Amino acid sequence: MTEGQEHEWHIELDYMRAQLRYALDNLDSLSKRNDVKGKIENVYFTLDELCEQTKGESK
């Protein structure tokens, strides 16, 4: 992994962490449930993309 890729991963991971924190903090709030679902879906899809991108790198 290059230094640039590593920096991108840190940015993505920080963003996902913030989204998960928001989702966890608002999990019980029915008025924010669509926001919570959206944040969790964003994290899932970002992780899915990162996993797909790195599949070939581990070989």
Image (cartoon, rainbow, N blue to C red):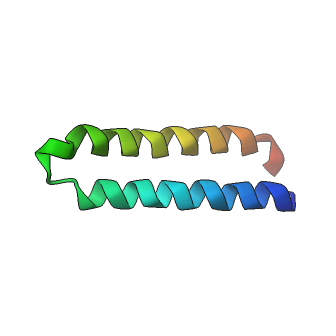
Q: Is residue 24 above or below residue 56?
A: below
Where residue 19 sits in the image (x, y, percent)? Answer: 42, 54
Where residue 10 sits in the image (x, y, percent)? Answer: 66, 62
The answer to whether 1 appears left or right of 39 in the picture is: right
The answer to whether 26 appears left or right of 47 in the picture is: left
The answer to whether 41 appears left or right of 34 in the picture is: right
Q: Is residue 1 visible?
A: no
Q: Is residue 37 above or below residue 12?
A: above
Nearest the camera: 54 or 37? 37
What residue lies at 31% left-to-right and 53% top-to-bottom?
Answer: 23
- Which image quarter: residue 9? bottom right
Q: Residue furthest front?
A: 31
Q: Is residue 18 above or below residue 57?
A: below
What residue lies at 47% left-to-right and 46% top-to-bottom?
Answer: 43
The answer to whether 51 appears left or right of 46 in the picture is: right
Where residue 58 sits in the image (x, y, percent)? Answer: 80, 50
Classify the position of the N terminus by image quarter: bottom right
Where residue 52 sits in the image (x, y, percent)? Answer: 67, 37
What residue lies at 85% left-to-right and 62% top-to-bottom?
Answer: 3
What residue lies at 74% left-to-right and 45% top-to-bottom?
Answer: 54
Nearest the camera: 13 or 54? 13
Q: Is residue 39 visible?
A: yes
Q: Residue furthest right?
A: 2
Nearest the camera: 50 or 33? 33
- Which image quarter: residue 31? top left
